[in-house]
Image (spheres, helix red, strand yellow):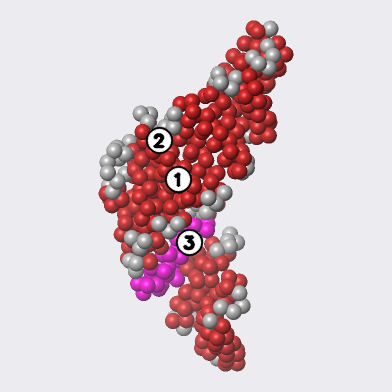
Amino acid sequence: MAEDYNDLYNEARQNGSYGNFEAAAGNYERAADVAAREFGPEDERLLDSLSRLGYCRYRLGELVKAEQSYKEALTLIERFHNDAYPDRLASILWALAVLMSDAQRYSEAEQYYKRSMAVSETWAGPTDRFVADCLWGLSKCLTNSGRGLEAESAIKRAISIYESLPDDCRDYLATNHANLGALIFKRNDYEGALHHLVRAFALRADLNGANLAETKDDVHKYASVRFERYYDDATFALVEKIVFVCLKQHKYSLAEKYLHQSLSAAYRLFGYDDMQTLAILLESAACYNSQNKYLKTVAMLQKPLSILRQVPLERDFSPPALRVAVAFEMSLALIALKRKKEAKEHLNWLLQVHRDDRLSLDNIYAESNMRLGLILEEECQYKKARKHFEDALFSRQKIYGPEHKMVAEAMLNLARCFEYLRLHDEASRLSQKAGQMIRDLRNRA
């Protein structure tokens, strides 16, 4: 019967090596039945089959069954093999911790990570690679349990271990530096967060061939050198965080450099109409507009928007909401530059897209209507302006509630338009209502 077990076990391993976890799970389950029946619970083959069965079930997303298999294996190893296979015991405890974490059972996962780490430290020492892996997993549990400072300590220790190992741990180091930067950011320590995020960026680019990991961290140097060809999805995500931290610190020029680099990579990898490219364009435009660099916004967005407006929405991969947001930033820059005819074209287009696709960008819809109404009012097109002012008022009431300074402002604009249309009673009523609202708001303040 041992031969039957070996046949099942070997077939299971072969299936698993090809990623056929469903077939492998069936083989391991049958192998475990044979081992339990023929060799007894103390035999290592039963333990091995059950632990591998747990892994296959985990890969299949069968978390309940995977937990059952792992716990059966854990019972066997603790009863019969506790001192013989500390590495396997640590591995099973770690697998259970990962499973619990995936199921958002963070308190239970934390205990399994700590048990696995204790076994590893006793068996292989406090600087073993597996200890670092446990600390990484533990930090996720602590983060999701709201214990940020403890999570930071766990990540720092994990980083220290990874850095001391002869193995290539750049991937793990990049992820842990990024996680640490995100945690430090939550404490409003923007400089500390930026250090770790940039370190993660350097490691990620180095993994892709940029040869940065051994150089001294320099946020300005990394932002200035052309690393576009070293970008991947993780690098784009990191740059987004770096830019956000830079903007929080009002380091606009540094944010611009990273955005420019990221945008060049996005153009090369995705083209003009991809969601990733549009997201970076939007962030770049907002960055320029916040510094009154409107000419840069226009120069950057002109070609992408001309392409996007020619591509039918149903044939495009980019969400309409992103297109609308980019067009809105363009219109803000054009209005500031007094190029209102062009701004009006973009505003009309984005409002039409908004209506056709029934988007829920209430703030952009409100502000676009308001700005288009003001342009039309300047052109003495009061009837058209009235419609946009009314839409802006309705949207602002939806966003801010019936009483807010932004609602009052919309009322006053509409009242002024009523005056131009010689609707004096409506203008007076609305103007008085807005004035009373402003007085009430001041009194409450």
Which residue does the image show at 55% across and 86% down from the upper left?
A: 443
Please tell me how crowded label 1 is: few (under 14), some (14-19), or many (20+) other residues with Cα within 10 Å.
Answer: some
Checking the image for residue 144, the label placed there is none
Q: Nearer the viewer, residue 319 or 86?
A: 86
Q: Residue 405 lies in magenta, yes or no? A: no
SS for dot 1 = helix
Is 99 drawn above or below residue 85 in the view shown? below
Residue furthest to the right: 37
State left or right for residue 40 relative to residue 271: right
Q: Using the image as rendered, state which of residue 107 and residue 286 is in the foreground.
A: 107
Tell me: residue 3, above or below residue 255: above
Q: Earlier in the sequence, mark 3 or mark 1?
A: 1
Task: Say which label, 3 or 2, has the lower sequence index.
Answer: 2
* Magenta run includes residue 324: yes
Residue 86 placement (x, y as % from top left): 53, 24
Task: Give the amino acid at mark 3.
Answer: Ala
Q: Main secondary structure of the magenta part?
A: helix
Q: Nearer the viewer, residue 369 or 119?
A: 119
Dot 2, how many residues are within 10 Å of its Cα: few (below 14), some (14-19), or many (20+)?
many
**Would residue 331 be found to the left or right of residue 40 on screen?**
left
Please tell me whether mark 3 or mark 2 is closer to you in this view: 2
Q: State the quadrant of the N terminus.
A: top right
The amino acid pointed to by label 1 is Ser
Q: What residue is shown with label 1?
A: 153
Q: CA distance from mark 3 to mark 2?
A: 44 Å
- Closer to the camera in the image, 303 or 323: 323
Read off the magenta span.
Answer: 320-346
Residue corresponding to mark 3 = 325
**Which residue sits at x=36%, y=33%?**
164
Q: Earlier in the sequence, mark 2 or mark 1?
A: 1
Reading the image, the residue beneath label 2 is 161
